[in-house]
Image (spheres, grey):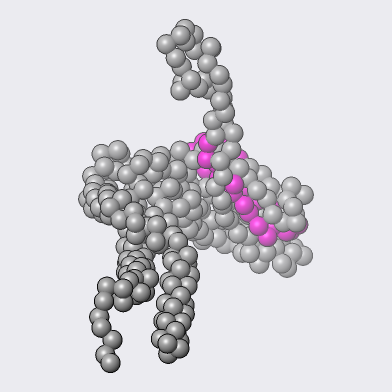
Amino acid sequence: MKKKFSISNIRDYIPIIISFIILVILVIGLIFTINIKFDEKNATVDTSSNDNYISLNIEDLALDIQACDGDTTGPDDAKKVTFDYKTEWVFDRQEYDMSAATADTKELTDLPLIDVDTMAFDITLSNITDKLKVVITNDFDDEVVNINYSDTTNGTYVYQTKNTNDIIRYTVSIYSSSCNNLYREFEVLMPKYNYYSDYDRCKYVTSYYCQKLVTSDFSFTDFSINTNDEYEKNYQKAVEEEAKKENNSIRNILSNNYIIFIVIAVILIILIIVFITLRFKRKRGK
């Protein structure tokens, strides 16, 4: 006889129906997870080009080189001398912390002192031999740096300058240490720190005007005009992406915990299979 349909039959399958619905929701959530990760990747504004280093242009000056008597390696050694730099933040001064001022502050001296750092250039000359001596001058001031091999560490000399506010051209003259003949001379244009790069808009701009180091002077007006279009475009894009993230908080939860949801989905599938198997065996036993 054909088994009559009843509500009790449907109740027997309620756990399967609920498990199936949960499984479908998890699958849809995982699909959204893939989409949200893709959107976040596209929203990134890459400003890695605005770093603290730009390549130097070393310009060798034409010379009529004459080696000293008995010096067979000096001129070739001079050609191997290299000039490079790195940036670092170093202590510059102390000043009063204006952010600590309150309505009760009467004197500037009542405020605490804080350390203020400044960017410095560590200029490194390498491959200096005992056949050479090096003299560094510049077109900004009268400073002269004299370097003998005894001043180096295995041929390397590090010269630090805190003047990173000006574009300075350095002249490096390499002489024989024995007879003072000039073996090589080259010029290097050192960049300056671009304080406009600290402006918030440079978080969204990759152009020259937002680089940390620059080799030309420009005004705030030039900076504003030449960064405005890129800033507005990338800033608007970032705002839209942020709004999209806020409107998809559930998707973000899934994105951050997708492994847990996969495990739950697998467990549900196993439970459904076990439940159906047990139901099938029970019916066969009746």
Q: Does the magenta stretch include residue 251?
A: no
Q: Would residue 269 be found to the left or right of residue 43 on screen?
A: right
Observer-nearest of 98 and 16:
16
Observer-nearest of 110 and 79:
110
In the rendering, at what x and y percent does residue 3 appear? 28, 86
Q: Is residue 120 magenta?
A: yes
The residue depicted at 65 percent of the width and 57 percent of the height is 126
Q: How many labels does the image show?
A: 0
* Residue at the farthest bottom position: 1
* Stretch in magenta: 118-144
- Let me know if residue 194 appears in the view: yes
- Say above or below: 52 vs 21: above
In the rendering, at what x and y percent does residue 77 appear? 67, 64
The residue depicted at 74 percent of the width and 64 percent of the height is 71
**Which part of the image, by quadrant, shows the N terminus?**
bottom left
The residue depicted at 35 percent of the width and 46 percent of the height is 202
Observer-nearest of 41 and 226:
41
Observer-nearest of 100 and 252:
252
Q: Would residue 152 be found to the left or right of residue 33 on screen?
A: right
The residue depicted at 43 percent of the width and 47 percent of the height is 212
In the rendering, at what x and y percent does residue 67 appear? 68, 63
**Which part of the image, by quadrant, shows the C terminus?**
bottom left
- Let me know if residue 75 appears in the view: no
In the rendering, at what x and y percent does residue 281 appear? 45, 87
- Say above or below: 273 vs 215: below
* Residue at the farthest front position: 1
- Say above or below: 129 vs 221: below
